[in-house]
Image: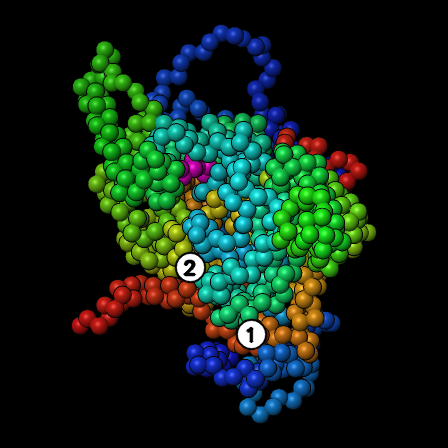
Amino acid sequence: MRSAIFVLVVGVAAGGCAPGARQPTNKAPEPRAGPVASGDAFPSAYVPFPSTPTLIRGGTILTAAGDVIPGGQVLMVDGKIAAVGAHVDAPAGVTVVEATGKYVTPGLIDDHSHLGAGPSPAVPALANVNERTNPSTPEVWVEHSVWPQDPGFNRARAGGITTLQILPGSANLIGGRSVVLRNVPARTVQEMKFPGAPYGMKMACGENPKRVYATRGPSTLMGNVAGYRAAFIRAREYKKRWDDWEKAGRDSTKIPALDLGMETMKGVLEGTILIHNHCYTAEQMQIQMDVFREFGVRPRSFHHAVEAYKIADLLARDSVSVSIWADWWGFKMEAWDAVNANLALVQQAGARAIVHSDDANGIQRLNQEAAKGMLAGREIGIQVTDDQAIRWVTANPAWALGIQDRVGTLEAGKIADVVVWDRYPFSVYARAEKVFIDGALVYDRTDPSRQAVSDFELGVFPGESR
Amino acid sequence: MRFQCTLAAVAVAFAVPVAPLAAQVIAIEGGTVYTMAGPPIENGTVLIRDGKILAVGVGISVPNGARRIDARGKIVTPGLFESSTHIGLAEVDAVETTNDFVAQGPAGTATSDLITAAFNVADGINPASMVIPVTRISGVTTTVTRPEGGLVAGQGVVIDLAGSRLDDMLVKSPAAMFASLGDASRVAGGGARAGATLRLREVLDDAKQYAARRTAFERNETRDFAESRLDLEALIPVVEGRLPIAVEAHRASDIRTVLRIADEYRLKLILLGATEGWMVAGDIASARVPVVVKALDDLPASFERLGARLENAALLRAAGVLVAITTNTTHDARNLKQEAGNAVANGLPYEEALRAITLYPAQIWGVADTHGSLEAGKVADVVVWDGDPLELLTRVNAVIIGGRPIPLVSRQTELRDRYRDPAAARRAYGADAAP
């Protein structure tokens, strides 16, 4: 039984970080000066929760950086990992978390989620994932769809998720801009936005766009590909206009016209916005690699990639990661050739394998999905180590999101996103016991005051039912 | 190693055109046997003959010529039992012609018929479905394959996941009438829950009338009935309490409504889903109604599921309710053990979780005389595991259905093996013949 009434202590703490009392003013602010593509118009307002220096000691540490340290220690100071090892020097007065018999891993990262944009409850008013009005909508930004009160964020945190990418849906060839979030309780999406994380651009291959736009087109795979290429040709021209303007001395009387969608695509061409491409089948992924090569860009990750195992060598050659399920299959033709060993086979070929969720339920158990992938490897003699499997849900998605230097491993200097599991994390019985984000305890299974409840869920459990 | 050789021999033997079943004697020896009928038996033997379990215990003598499966250090359980699926009726979700579990016409249109009690799914079952091997090699040997849709969806059946003909597979038909009350069926009541219950009561009343006055009906001497003759016929065993009615309901108040109607009409009720069941667990327990839950549903996915929580199965069981666990899926039914394992992580006692995917569903769906436990006389659906059956890293070593060893292959393992060697992809298409 869950006990008592959940109190959102962490939320209160966040309130304490807000600016002091100020008289309201109705004076309009100056327009922001930064370039549209950079996202300066929607700055992150993320402030780490308060933390105290904390030493986790005695647990088995999976660093996701090659080391497994039995009975090791992790020291977190000022929101950063200060030291990791068999024994570390901790300052006096440090808060100690006893983890003997437990496991310690980096915070889990899901690079494919629609939380907030397609939240629980699944009612039409809250369905904001797909801008299904045009096959190509690079101009939309999914952060403008995110409802921070989606209870799924809290459920995901209880499953150890500390960072996640919210993507637009897959109805469109080009679905719009993604956003990377810190999984903290918040009132606004900007209070969650990962400061400095690159944006992504969602693209989709295959059945979804051709089904959604069957009557107006594209209605075939070749129609899909024509759509990507047309968009990139436009983007290249757009970029050239701006580059020429820059080279010619930024004449303020000749500023090229701004185009929201092309601003995102220009970021893609410049490599500052990462391509996340929903694409299931082997032959379509290969065509996409040709398309991207045509325009001098590289996809960061193919998502779903059910047939990645068929072209794992090509993915490794081009350093494309794949963000995949352990075992989803059968829901459509392009998911018909799924095999459980997909993760292991991709890893064996030297490409980056990532376990993603695309699901508000699955995101709560990425560790279990990784375990299923390990088993499928073992069944064909591919020994996936604990360190490799934990990378599927930490370091590898961090790389896909372009934040690998900041999160995803337990190494000194990284952001202190850490999960303490009550046992071996690839056990079906394992549960995240403590979750730290920026070194702050944001979830504790044993402490109801550290189990955030969204506004939406208040009143659901009336007193007499508890 | 020795064990693997034994398995290979089993697989090869299976590929040879079938020794007559009667000749097959199989002994699974040395494992820890979770019979589900009592405490686990260490170093036990499960002896199988003619498709049935002949004996289970310690020190059972194995006849000469029996096929021996070495299960030392392994766990032996009954085959797992999935309580709610479309296996056999569904191949690719998005390929409409491969789906045969809804007989109501296009949903949400004027032509949809939301009460199709006469629809029994059995004739539509495809023993050659690709989903069947994928599922059974995970240890799931038995399913309730069911219809879907509307207020009364039709009749579901219990099947074993082996055999090339429907007759080989069918364990019980019908096993239950399927219905729903809540978001999914309010449209049948003109867009209101109480409208749906009004329709349900009308249908049940008509069935009772029809049962009492069949002769008069044939002579056209009865009042008009709202449903067809076939539907009314199919509902007779339901209103007579002989055939269970399995009703999907999630909101606590909907569950109470279903309990009320079942009591009014003296129906043999099974609750499905019951997302908020834990909130009314006492009522369910005192009505002695069993519940089939999806253990992993913990999101307020709709306004009828606001109370979703992972402890549902544990809390219902603690209140004395008979609980079976389901994935409530088709392609992912192979994850049944993961559902059960998570129920354990959230408070359900371990052996209760095992029973929730073996013995209890057999009892709930009325096939416990032949299924659900390892006891002499029951059908030999047996799985050998190399560890805890609920653990994610545990391998299935052997699956036996109806006394027949099942080769551990599926379309998926064939695809995997075609591509497992990165250099072999082209060989897969015959290029290995090239110099």
User: What kind of element bears circle 1?
Assistant: strand
The answer to the question of whether label 2 and label 1 lie on touching residues, with beta carbons closer than 8 A, is no
Q: Which mark is residue A339?
A: 2
Q: Residue at x 71, y 54 (%)?
A: B214
Judged from the image, the secondary structure of the residue bearing numbered disc 2 is: loop
- Of B275 and B6, nearer the camera is B275
Q: Left or right of A100: which side holds B93? A: left
Q: Amino acid at mark 2?
A: Val
**Residue sitting at 54 percent across and 29 percent down?**
A125
Instruction: Name the amino acid, label 1.
Output: Ile
Chain hosting mark 1: B
Label 2 marks a residue whose chain is A
Q: Residue at x 71, y 48 (%)?
A: B221
Considering the image in quadrants, where does the C terminus of chain A appear? top right
- Mark pair 2, 1: CA separation: 23 Å
Q: Which residues make up the magenta segment?
A: A165-171
Residue B4 pos. (x, y %): 48, 78
Q: Position of residue A363 (x, y in %)?
A: 53, 46
- Picture quadrant where residue B17 is located: bottom left
Residue A4 visible in the shown view:
yes
- What residue is disc 1 on? B400
Give the left or right position of residue B119, taking residue B181 as reference: left
Q: Nearer the viewer, residue A145 or B106?
A: B106
